[in-house]
Image (cartoon, grey):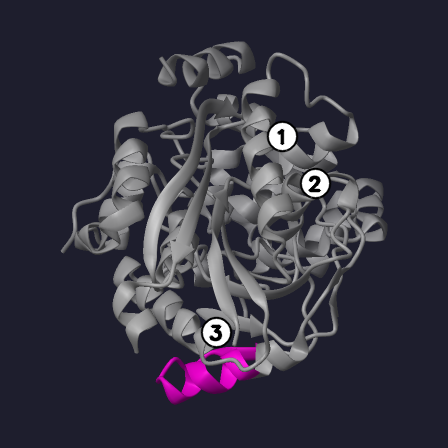
Amino acid sequence: MTQDIPGTTMFDGDQAQKGLALNRMCFSFNSAENRAAFLRDEEAYCTKYGLTDEQRAAVKSRNVLRMIETGGNVYYLAKLAGIFGLNVQDIGAQQTNTTVDEFKAKLVAAGR
Amino acid sequence: MAKIIGGVATTHVPSIGKAIADKKQKDPYWNPFFKGFDFVHYWLAREKPDVAVVFYNDHGLNFFLDKLPTFAVGAANEYRNEDEGWGIPVSSSIQGDPALSWHLINALVADEFDITMCQDMLVDHSVTIPMGLMWPGEKWQGIKIVPVSINTVQHPLPSLARCLKLGRSVGRAIESYEQDLRVMIVGTGGLSHQLDGKRAGFINKEFDKLCMDKIVNEPDFLTRYSVHDFVEEAGAQGVEFLNWMAMRGALTGQVKELHRNYHIPISNTAAATVVLENRPSAERKAA
């Protein structure tokens, strides 16, 4: 058994099964029409894609760590984040409980 | 006969697409990355490749997680890009080379790589951004591509060793192709980065350096790392390095590093651009 990597969820078969509905919904956001439909009625859109209660709650709260817990894959979640104009640094800051400026500073520091 | 002239590996972070659209190449944030392409442009102008075989990973444009091939080879006349949902401009199409694609497909399957063959295939930023970096202004009408997609998203992923072997098989296939084509190999993505979880923002400069050093002439050294090790060392999305391994595998001759640019950060990523030259080895020449 390999050791878990702290702060990292391997997107494996377990996660893939758990997250299929959520990721499928996010995959649909490749279409501008679907992004608009989500913004018009988020609840109805989540229902259409069969999200679990936990996934709906995670989406509603915009909480990326909870979306990952419920099987979300970050490349697909990024499509959802994009609807709200958020990029991977915004969601990086949210997940690490820092401000976006702090998160960016940490990245710059990694280069020194 | 077709000739493999060398390889280019580069990061494909989506925000590069936005920076190109907003003409930010000279901005202090972006310049250290974009100036790394001056040499690439010089090299491409000098070497004049006809075809690029591009190893990349799809991020949910052509493939979804319901049916996800480990390896997929494009065999289309042209490759379109479409809306990926995160606000980067859609690129113009890139020409394919179906005859070379089918030659590679036949050779790979004969060599026991049971790839998926795609006569229709959308290509995402993982192809279009490296192409746009190499041929600014989308001036890529003079080149055709064969995209080869590697699953770096949904585990289990292929091992580093397997991707190196895939590349070697592609390299042998190209060398057996009768047309006089000048073929370049592209590997996209990486280097260290992690977008998800409490470890988001993880970057590992020392490990990236090791990878860039070893891939030139000791790519087999890197096969000691399992995918799990690699996630630990390079971050969850740092495993895009699998595309670099395949690229390197396809360079079948004597390989020399001509150029390297490494800069932290571009978005959440340690950005790298490398040019490797491939010269037919002495034995091969004699044979």
State which chain disc 1 sits on: A
Label 1 and label 2: CA atoms lie apart by 8 Å
State which chain disc 2 sits on: B
Q: Quadrant of the C terminus of chain A?
A: top left
> Is residue A98 on the magenta stretch?
no
Question: Which percent across, then down, holds residue B204?
Answer: 31, 29
Frontmost of labels 3 and 1 is: 3
Question: Which percent across, then down, holds residue B15?
Answer: 64, 32
Task: Give the residue type at disc 1.
Answer: Asn
Indicate which disc residue B174 carries: 3
Q: Which residue is mark 1?
A: A87
Task: Give the residue type at disc 3.
Answer: Ile
Q: Nearer the viewer, residue A28 or B249?
A: B249
- Residue at screen point 64% across, 62% down: B50
Indicate which disc residue B278 carries: none
Q: Which residue is mark 2?
A: B86
- Residue at screen point 52% across, 35% down: A64
- Residue at screen point 49% across, 67% down: B3
Q: Are marks 3 and 1 on the same chain?
A: no
Pointer 3 with pointer 1, Cβ within 8 A: no
Q: Residue furthest front?
A: B286
Label 3 and label 1: CA atoms lie apart by 39 Å
Q: Quadrant of the N terminus of chain A?
A: bottom left
Pointer 1 with pointer 2, Cβ within 8 A: yes
Q: Nearer the viewer, residue B279 or A42?
A: B279
- Mark 2 or mark 3: whose residue is earlier in sequence: 2
Question: Which percent across, then down, holds residue A102?
Answer: 48, 10
